[in-house]
């Protein structure tokens, strides 16, 4: 299937508008947008997957209820404060944020999703959100989608958007999204925050199913630091304004839609990995010919999460032993004596381990490969037909610096 | 039970001698000792636990066979090269190292343990080991125990030894050991390398049982970077020269011995955590009143392994939200609404979270507490009677630096 990439993000699909501004929730810098609103012109099928962390944020608890009903008009998101470990008061403030957006949309609060990201602990200063409400209402436009992507950033260094168009039932459908996330990234069900909107018509149950499928091979396959956030949320809204025949069963249209959703989710997930806190290299770990997909996944994620592997890529050191070591402790079922490992980038490819034993490879060629910004590690298990890919980044001084003084 | 701490390490117990020297296995610096031999004057009961990494090093494969038989005269250890992912040739070289020690001890190679630590991939240069054999034989002495502890170091900055005496069946028994480990530390069954010798008389099966008990609350409770090494080994030799009645059942003497073994194992494990690569703070994470010991352990290890928690302590930031977050994703069964978190050190104690909600604590007092080198995090689950403790260190620029250029 081919999808045409288009510009824009969360407002690329028909009927979606956004607004974003500086409400002063935490950041004093007036240039830092920290509050975003995205609304659909008509009610949308809503689906979401959320963190499995036991300290799930108050807005996550709220969103679970909303997507369980399967219908929403949009979402309101703040950065700076996570509204996590905030007790009953935190939940009440998450609902109050929903009410602000609901008043603008003209719908019940229960049809508005709420997401927060930032420091764990403090309460959301609601007076700042209430003060911002009139400007949010007036600012709503298709063009503000990019500003919304900026407003949800915390330690991110770039905004993350992606959008594609494709045909469903003879109608042109658009699917676009935005995401944020740079640290505390080891998603388990979903990532920090990701939002995809589409004008496709699809029933909520099938939207949820496609979302889970897409999550498994996108946000669940990235790792910056191994810490699973309390606020991870991946939300999709489908408002049906493309006019395609409603997808109500797993027919060909469903397969097309699910593939499109997966493509945008992977695109956003890779942008999160590439923008990992302090990262100087983007790492792609491909695992081929595994016994099962779960085995391939365990290895890909163990390698991309290993501090020692990540530090070696920072040092541009072809330390393949650490890659084998991480595969070895991953818990995957595989035959260590069959494994090949190859390092590659735009500068070439070098096989460093074959059939479970190290090779005398060309160190100079390896050094050139590792000097590139984007590196691929290919681990061929020669043990089956399953394959998968994970994405991450290297471990640098700057990661430590950023997280040594993030809160203060 | 009280145990008297004494000086010395792996040769503190009666009948153990050591030798250590620079064989030039990897390090060019002639001052860096890299080969150690420890022998007992008479055959010793031998027990060991080893890495669960599928790429278990060749010497680990060798040692598993030796401790399965339960009898050994001693061990030979090199640093610089790990003899891991080295195939059949690596196993043959591990046996050749055993033969060198066996010729000195006058026993079969199958009664000598072999350990290696260092870079994964290269083969051990056997001619260097063979050349060193005469000097190893001549160097054997009780006094060289400290040199052996130096010879097994890689990125370690200090040698790690511990020894105690106590009474068993009316006889004075000594138990002493040495360990190494600074990076690739997230033991799963055992740690990088740890050796304990004792003159106690105990049957091999009970020695193995006591070893497993001690491992669970010592080496399995430390974490530097979350990477489980391919070479983790914790070995105990008991040569019976103290003359105590042979421990053949789980009587009071066994309980005393197991407690003594645990004390020395914890002492060595804490020294490894405190010497974590690049560490500027030593972290102790105590979990109290858990539902089960496994739940308490999951939380303690998740907190001590979290890159974000570790970076916050480097930055001396009382970022308790990251501690709660790590507990939340640990997989432990607990009630998030009951949890208290307290930070303490020689400079005082400050409770930062009570009953699952953050407190407005004294930031100045917290800053003083976190400026100390040794910090304790106490997580009280108020949910049962199980408790445990894990140890680790902070994540610093130097960790990244050390691992960015370790191999080259």
Image (cartoon, coloured by chain):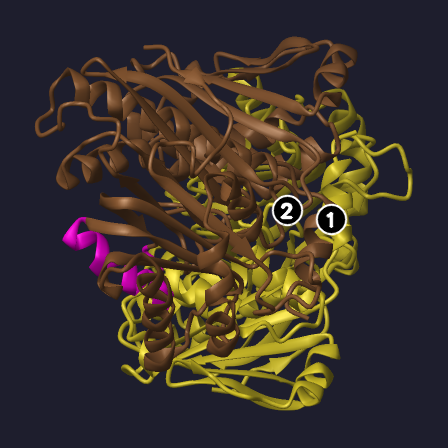
Chain colours: A brown, B yellow
Q: What residue is rendered at 58% in x and 28% in y?
A: A283
Please provide percent x and percent y for residue A276: 60, 42
Q: Main secondary structure of the magenta part?
A: helix
How many marks the image carries: the answer is 2
* A126 is within the stretch colored magenta: no
**Helix, strand or loop at mark 2:** loop
Q: Work out whether residue B404 can be spotted.
A: yes
Q: Quadrant of residue A384?
A: top left
Please provide percent x and percent y for residue A103: 32, 65
Disc 2 target residue: A277
Q: Is residue B385 above or below residue A280?
A: below
Residue nearer the viewer, B135 or A266: A266
Pick out the residue farthest to the front.
Answer: A138
Q: Which residues are magenta?
A: A52-70
Residue nearer the viewer, A351 or B209: A351
Disc 1 target residue: A398
Answer yes or no: do the residues labelled 2 and 1 have beta carbons within 8 Å? yes
Q: What residue is rendered at 42% in x and 82% in y?
A: B357
């Amino acid at each position: 299937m081919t999808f045409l990439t288009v510009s824009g993000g969360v407002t690329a699909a028909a009927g979606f508008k956004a607004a974003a501004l500086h409400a002063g929730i935490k950041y004093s810098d007036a240039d830092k947008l920290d509050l975003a609103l995205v609304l659909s012109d008509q009610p949308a099928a809503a689906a979401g997957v959320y963190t499995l962390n036991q300290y799930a944020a108050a807005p996550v608890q709220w969103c679970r209820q909303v997507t369980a009903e399967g219908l929403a008009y949009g979402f309101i998101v703040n950065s700076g404060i996570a509204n996590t470990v905030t007790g009953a008061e935190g939940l009440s403030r998450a609902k109050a944020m929903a009410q602000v957006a609901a008043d603008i949309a003209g719908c019940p609060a229960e049809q508005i999703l709420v997401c927060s990201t930032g420091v764990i602990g403090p309460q959301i200063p609601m007076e700042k959100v209430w003060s911002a409400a009139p400007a949010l209402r007036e600012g709503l436009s298709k063009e503000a989608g990019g500003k919304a992507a900026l407003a949800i950033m915390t330690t991110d260094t770039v905004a993350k958007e992606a959008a594609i168009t494709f045909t469903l039932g003879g109608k042109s459908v658009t699917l676009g999204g935005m995401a944020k996330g740079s640290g505390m990234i080891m998603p388990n069900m979903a990532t920090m925050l990701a939002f995809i909107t589409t004008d496709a018509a699809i029933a909520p149950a099938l939207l949820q199913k496609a979302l889970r499928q897409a999550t498994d091979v996108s946000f669940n396959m990235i790792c910056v630091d191994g810490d699973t956030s309390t606020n991870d949320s991946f939300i999709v809204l489908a408002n049906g304004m493309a006019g395609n025949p409603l997808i109500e069963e797993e027919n060909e249209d469903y397969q097309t839609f699910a593939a499109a959703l997966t493509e945008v989710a992977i695109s956003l997930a890779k942008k999160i990995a590439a923008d990992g806190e302090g990262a100087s290299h983007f790492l792609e770990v491909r695992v081929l010919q595994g016994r099962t997909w779960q085995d391939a996944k365990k290895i890909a994620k163990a390698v991309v999460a290993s501090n020692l592997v990540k530090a070696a890529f920072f040092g541009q050191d072809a330390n393949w032993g650490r890659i084998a070591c991480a595969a070895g402790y991953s818990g995957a079922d595989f035959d260590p004596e069959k494994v090949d490992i190859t390092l590659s980038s735009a500068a070439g490819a070098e096989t460093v381990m074959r059939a479970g034993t190290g090779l005398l490879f060309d160190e100079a060629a390896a050094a050139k490969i590792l000097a590139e910004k984007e590196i691929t590690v290919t681990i061929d298990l020669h043990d089956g037909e399953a394959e998968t890919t994970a994405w991450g980044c290297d471990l640098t001084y700057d990661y430590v610096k950023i997280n040594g003084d993030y809160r203060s």
